[in-house]
């Protein structure tokens, strides 16, 4: 009986460790089980990438105008379903010289999904991205940063880079001023900034774009796309 109790207790401890480990792995912005994941690049150059998630949606034209005003390239992590619904916005983003990344077709959490589901979500979105006229590298960002095994395994097999972020102003502020302060306080050389700007709910995030750019430029930062930032990985100061 004692052995059974001890065995059961050890089994429960092992199960809890597995669950807790899986939870942290699923949500990690800095690690995955297979393939390359980048939350920022190691460089002493003052370069930073601005990334905008979701959509394209109804505020897409406004976002493009703000980026043009700021004079910076951005990397848009877009959903295939939204691209199919608003192809004119996808074409406008590509025509403006921005980078398009894959954010799945349906924006579902990519956890406990089959390899077939992963392939469908990624490949259908790739096809919609190419329909915009964009011909550059397509990196991938998992919705909600959720991933376990099937997604990283697929991306590794297809030599695709998972891109997360290390600066998330919206996580600590809900006003444009607060987001600017958060961004400038958190940014380091090689940082990747995340904002959500495409929907009506992103008013403060849209208002933060231009002042974030101005503040970081005043501090000597240059804005590049994610694929350009990845090429700087390991770059040393001149």
Image (spheres, rainbow, N blue to C red):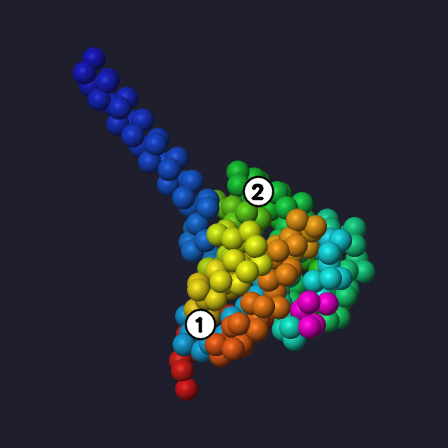
Label 2 SS: loop
What residue sits right under mark 2 in the picture?
A: 109
Residue 211 position (above or below residue 114): below
Instruction: Farthest residue to the right: give it.
Output: 88
As drawn, the label of residue 189 is: 1
For residue 72, side relative to residue 234 (left or right) = right
Residue 19 falls within the magenta-colored stretch: no
Q: Earlier in the sequence, mark 1 or mark 2?
A: 2
- The percent position of residue 190, horizontal first and vertical second, equals 46, 70
Segment colored magenta: 65-69
Residue 143 position (above or below residue 40): above
**Which corner quadrant holds the C terminus?**
bottom left
Q: Which residue shows up at 53% across the image and 72% down it? A: 215
Residue 3 position (above or below residue 136): above
Is residue 203 visible to the viewer in this orientation of the structure?
Answer: yes
Label 1 SS: loop
Is residue 79 visible to the viewer in this orientation of the structure?
Answer: no
Q: Which residue shows up at 45% across the image and 53% down it? A: 29
Residue 66 falls within the magenta-colored stretch: yes
Residue 37 position (above or below residue 230): above
For the residue carrying disc 1, how many other residues have a C-alpha within 10 Å: few (<14), some (14-19), or many (20+)?
Answer: some
For residue 94, side relative to residue 140 (left or right) = right
Q: Nearer the viewer, mark 1 or mark 2?
A: 1
Report the front residue among 167 and 235: 167
Q: Which residue shows up at 71% across the image and 66% down it? A: 64
- The percent position of residue 107, horizontal first and vertical second, equals 63, 46
């Amino acid at each position: 009986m004692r052995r059974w109790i001890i065995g059961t207790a050890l089994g429960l401890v092992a199960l809890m460790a597995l669950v807790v480990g899986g939870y942290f792995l699923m949500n990690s912005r800095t690690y995955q089980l297979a393939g390359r994941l980048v939350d920022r690049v190691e460089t002493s150059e003052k370069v930073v990438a601005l990334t905008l998630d979701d959509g394209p949606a109804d505020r897409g034209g406004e976002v493009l105008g703000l980026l043009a005003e700021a004079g910076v390239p951005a990397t848009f992590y877009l959903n295939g379903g939204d691209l199919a619904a608003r192809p004119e916005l996808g074409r406008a983003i590509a025509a403006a010289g921005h980078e398009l990344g894959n954010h799945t077709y349906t924006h579902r959490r990519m956890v406990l999904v089959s390899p077939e589901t992963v392939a469908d979500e990624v490949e259908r979105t790739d096809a919609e991205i190419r329909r915009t006229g964009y011909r550059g590298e397509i990196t991938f960002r998992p919705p909600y940063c959720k991933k376990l095994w099937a997604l990283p395994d697929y991306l590794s097999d297809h030599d695709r880079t998972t891109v997360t972020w290390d600066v998330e102003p919206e996580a600590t502020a809900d006003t444009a001023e607060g987001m600017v302060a958060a961004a400038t306080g958190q940014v380091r050389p090689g940082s990747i900034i995340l904002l959500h700007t495409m929907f009506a709910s992103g008013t403060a995030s849209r208002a933060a774009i231009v002042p974030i750019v101005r503040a970081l430029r005043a501090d000597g930062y240059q804005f590049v796309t994610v694929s350009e930032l990845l090429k700087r990985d390991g770059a040393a100061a001149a």
